[in-house]
Image (spheres, grey):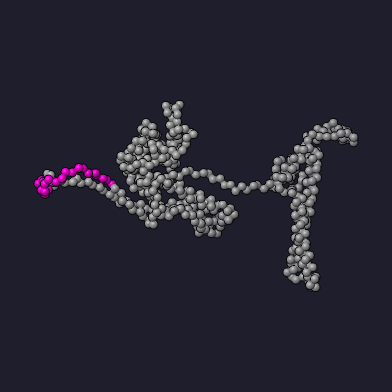
Amino acid sequence: MARKKFEELKRIAAEAAKGARELAEKADHEDRSLSDDERKDYDNLMAKAGDYLKQSRDAKADADILAAAKSLADEIGPAAAEDLDAQGKSSGKLARVKNLGLEVVNSAQFKAAMAPYEGRGGVPERAKFSTDPIAVKGLFVGGDQTSAGAFVTPEQTGIIEMLGRRELRLRDAISVRRTGSDTVEYVRQNSHTNAAAPVAEATSSAAPTHDIETGAPVLASGGGYKPEGSWSFERKTANVKTIAEWVPATKRALADAAQLEGLINDELRADIAEAEEDQILGGDGTGENLTGILETPGIQVQAFTTDIFTTVRKARTKARTVGRVVPNAVALNPIDVETVDLARENGDTGKFISGGPFSMGPRTLWGMPILETEAIDAGSSLVGDFSKAVLWDREQTAVSFTDSHADFFVRNLVAVLAEERVAFGVTRPTAFVQAAVSA
């Protein structure tokens, strides 16, 4: 590596010197002195040539030192040579070599080899002298016993590992529509009396009379009157609410890290989506909160009965018979989904009811797909027709940047803001049943 660096520096110095010479030769050929600009370029090229020539000499000296150290390490033993090779490859640059002789004479192997000759003025001229292999560590200044220290450049992998996200399921299950207004109105039926019945043909044309005391109408017998049903409706309003979040970032960070802007966008959008799912299910309707399904007046309730399977089945029946819907999903916390997956026939020794760990696929419970979501508390579930819950998108999630916040402009900071505007409503509350799935 040092030899290659020497050759490259020498080449650059030669090119700079050549450029300076060509300037001087051109002026001489034209029988004139160098102009001011030419003189400036000439001086710069000569300075550059001298600088790179000095660097090339230093690189050659480093290469010679490393070669000498390698030669001595080979004589000392293979372990020392391997250590020297490893450190040279890991650094990528040549550093100043330590006093290798000092490393050798202070080693336990050298002292053991010299022990028989203590007090004899050194090793006799014709005596055979050898040591066990000496492992020379830390040949490069600035490192520890196994590293080239400041000459090691960390590898930038580009990997950024975030903390992870929970799976979001509810937006895909409910009805999602667009709106261009800040207020959404819809009509919801309150009651329905079905009075339909078979009716005989009229046999009398007599007009109705009235009760003398109460004034109530009295229908003539055989009049063929049809029964009257009754419906009642109410107008409901859902206001558009804003879900938002912002984070600060430096302009330099956004400029230096190409992936940072995209990462911030993705993470902020995911935060908004998680907050939205929490609001869809459990928003309490106060302030700027949506009124979630679980907080909507009129949804049904099912108490815990026997086990999770029996309870959910009874909740399904309520949604079917009272809510007059065909339930299309059951929302469960991951802890309760685990209870479903691990349930066995005949206690803890029978077969897994769900089919076991090797038959995992789309989960269903009593024919209803399971929506596994952390937005619902463990021990609770929601059964129903989720198409009866509607989310209106006023503005889908958008991310914007600005330095017009507090003193961000003078501090080279920007605020990164993500926000969405949505409205939410449950068009038929009885279509949902909140069921307790644990005692």
Which residue reaches farthest bottom? 31
The answer, for residue 284, to whether it is visible in the render is no
Left or right: where does residue 137 sit relative to residue 309?
right
Residue 164 horizontal/vertical position (percent): 51, 44
In which quadrant is the C terminus drawn? top left
Q: Residue at x 76, y 46 (%)?
A: 97
Which residue reaches farthest left? 212
**Residue 206 within the segment the image draws in magenta:** yes
Query: Of residues 147 and 141, which is closer to you in this image?
Result: 147
Q: Residue at x 47, y 35 (%)?
A: 359
Q: Residue at x 47, y 53 (%)?
A: 418
Query: Of residues 34 and 121, which is closer to you in this image?
Result: 34
**Residue 117 within the segment the image draws in magenta:** no
Instruction: Tally the numbered discs.
Output: 0
Residue 213 horizontal/vertical position (percent): 10, 45
Residue 409 horizontal/vertical position (percent): 53, 59
Seen in the picture, residue 270 relative to 378 is either above or below; the reply is below
The rendered magenta stretch, by its main secondary structure, is classed as loop
Residue 15 horizontal/vertical position (percent): 76, 60
Query: Of residues 342 and 162, which is closer to you in this image?
Result: 342
User: In the rendered structure, which segment of residues is drawn in magenta?
Assistant: 190-216
Q: Residue at x 74, y 67 (%)?
A: 40
The answer, for residue 233, to whether it is visible in the render is yes
